[in-house]
Every structure is written in C-alpha cells, then in structure tokens.
Amino acid sequence: VGVTTVVVLTHPTMLIYLCLLFGLWHFHLRLIQQGIGSVFGFDLRNTFSPARRSLLLTLFSAYVGLFYCLKPLISIMFVSGFLIFMHALLRDPKNTDVTPQFGKFVHDSDDEEIGNEDYEESRGSA
C-alpha cells in the first residue's frame, strides 16, 4: 500500500485522467438511469446514443489505461518486487525457525546445538 501511494502521488497526470474518466462514466450512467435525453439544450439521443457513448468511453478508458496507468503499474510492481527481494536477501538467518517436520528441532541460534539424543528425549522416546 505504501509503495502504491508513493508511486501514484508521483504521477499526478494519471490521477487527473482517472478522475476525469470516473466523472465521465458516472455522468454516462446517470444519463442512462434517469433517462435524460438533453443536457444544456444539446440533444444527446441523436448525436451520442448510449451505445456510442459507451464505445467512446471504453476507448478512452483503454487509452488512459495504456498511456497513463501502465508505467505507474509497472513501477509499482518493480519497486515492490525489489523491496521483497532485498528483504529476503538481507534477512538475518539467525531468526529463522525450522520445524520438526523437516528433521530439525526449533531452537534459538544463541542456544547450544541440540543433538539427536536431546531431540529424542524431548519427544519422550527412549
């Protein structure tokens, strides 16, 4: 979430186009739901039918997605992947636990090494 917020805030053009796109789709859906045919004295039924408006808005959505949202999306994925990789690479191996199902006993790295006989005694076997 943090990486996404930072990357999105560094691309204000994308935010503006997404807000414009949201407003246009919202306006289009309101016109359809309320059956409004004319806006500001301009008859929309003849020039821009709902099917034609939907097509234009879909094309505009694809344009915005391709030219304004793709680069930030790739940046988000790259930065997140880089941070995850660096976290895994720089992680302290002393703090990792191994479970008994994989053949090793879980212990702290500062403790003495536990041998097989200690492991068998801790399980209650003779």
Image (cartoon, rainbow, N blue to C red):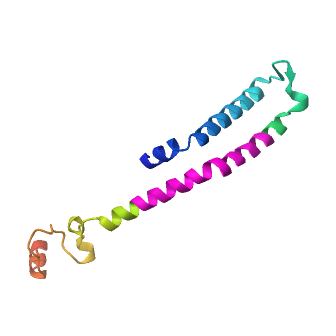
Q: 49 left or right of 76?
A: right
Residue 75, compared with residue 98, is above or below; it is above
User: Residue 67 lies in magenta, yes or no?
Assistant: yes
Residue 57, compared with residue 70, is above or below; it is above
Rendering coords of residue 46 (x, y %): 91, 29
The structure residue drawn at horizontal position 49% and vertical position 59%, both measured from the top left corner, is 78
Give the residues in magenta.
55-83
Rendering coords of residue 109 (x, y %): 15, 69
41 vs 13, nearest the viewer = 13
The structure residue drawn at horizontal position 67% and vertical position 51%, both measured from the top left corner, is 66
Residue 54, compared with residue 71, is above or below; it is above
User: Residue 79 lies in magenta, yes or no?
Assistant: yes
The quadrant where residue 45 appears: top right
Rendering coords of residue 69 (x, y %): 61, 48
Residue 124, compared with residue 32, is above or below; it is below
* Extreme residue in the top direction: 41
